[in-house]
Image: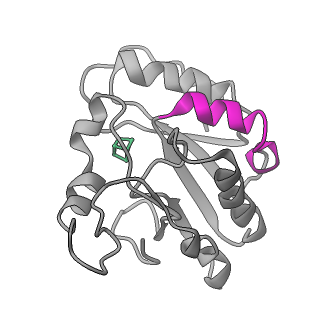
Amino acid sequence: MSDKSKIEWTDATWNPVRGCTKISPGCSHCYAETFAERFRGVRGHPFEQGFDLKIVPEKLCDPIRWGTSRRIFVNSMSDLFHERIPDDYISNVARVMVAANWHTYQILTKRAQRLHDLLNGKLRFAAAQNHIWWGVSVENRNHGLPRIDLLRDSLARVRFLSIEPLLEDLGEMNLKEIS
Ligand code: SF4
């Protein structure tokens, strides 16, 4: 959405997709939905359609235009692996990240099965890049912990976790190969 971010662990946000739908209990705390829905119906606003899923091809090349190296949170207002985003579009996002390799990218998802399947398939070319970090959200045992296993089993070179919102004690976690 913006080339500047107030999120402390990133420098900029980039949203070639806007909007999402809920998939697990952590989504009940979705800041993106709260933000987007404030602007539903505001003519001309990027979130005129609230949090409805929308592909935004005109934002696709933003990182190429940003000359200074940044740490970029990809799809801070969506989930890149949402089931309604076509594989080809996700591949285009990945191609931009590979091309604009002076930045570092952080991709965080709750849809770990699709991340796993694409990184081990069509997105293999992007999975191996050091400057692209792939992460999953872990909010509870039932939904969150299986995502860690899927991430570990993917070909991602750099893997990370977001443990928030933390909805319960996660117990023992296997963090092998999460780095
Ligand atoms: S997956 Fe993320 S962006 Fe989508 S509804 Fe859940 S918290 Fe919001």
Q: Main secondary structure of the magenta part?
A: helix
**Of the pair 166 and 77, the residue shown nearer to us:** 77
| Picture quarter with the N terminus | bottom left
Q: Is residue 63 left or right of residue 164?
A: right
**Of the pair 25 and 153, the residue shown nearer to us:** 25
Q: Position of residue 132 (x, y in %)?
A: 67, 54
**Residue 35 vertical placement versus 5 (above, below):** above
Residue for point 27% across, 46% down: 30
Q: Position of residue 158 (x, y in %)?
A: 67, 44
Ligand 1 found in image quarter: top left
Q: Is residue 11 left or right of residue 66?
A: left
| Picture quarter with the C terminus | top right
Q: Position of residue 135 (x, y in %)?
A: 54, 41
Q: Position of residue 23 (x, y in %)?
A: 37, 32
Residue for point 67% across, 45% down: 87
**Residue 140 vertical placement versus 61 (above, below):** above
Residue 7 inside the magenta-drawn segment: no
Bounds of the magenta span? 111-127
Residue for point 33% across, 37% down: 22
Total residue callouts: 0
Residue 116 inside the magenta-drawn segment: yes
Residue for point 62% across, 75% down: 63
**Of the pair 136 and 163, the residue shown nearer to us:** 136
State which quadrant residue 119 falls in.
top right
**Residue 136 vertical placement versus 50 (above, below):** above
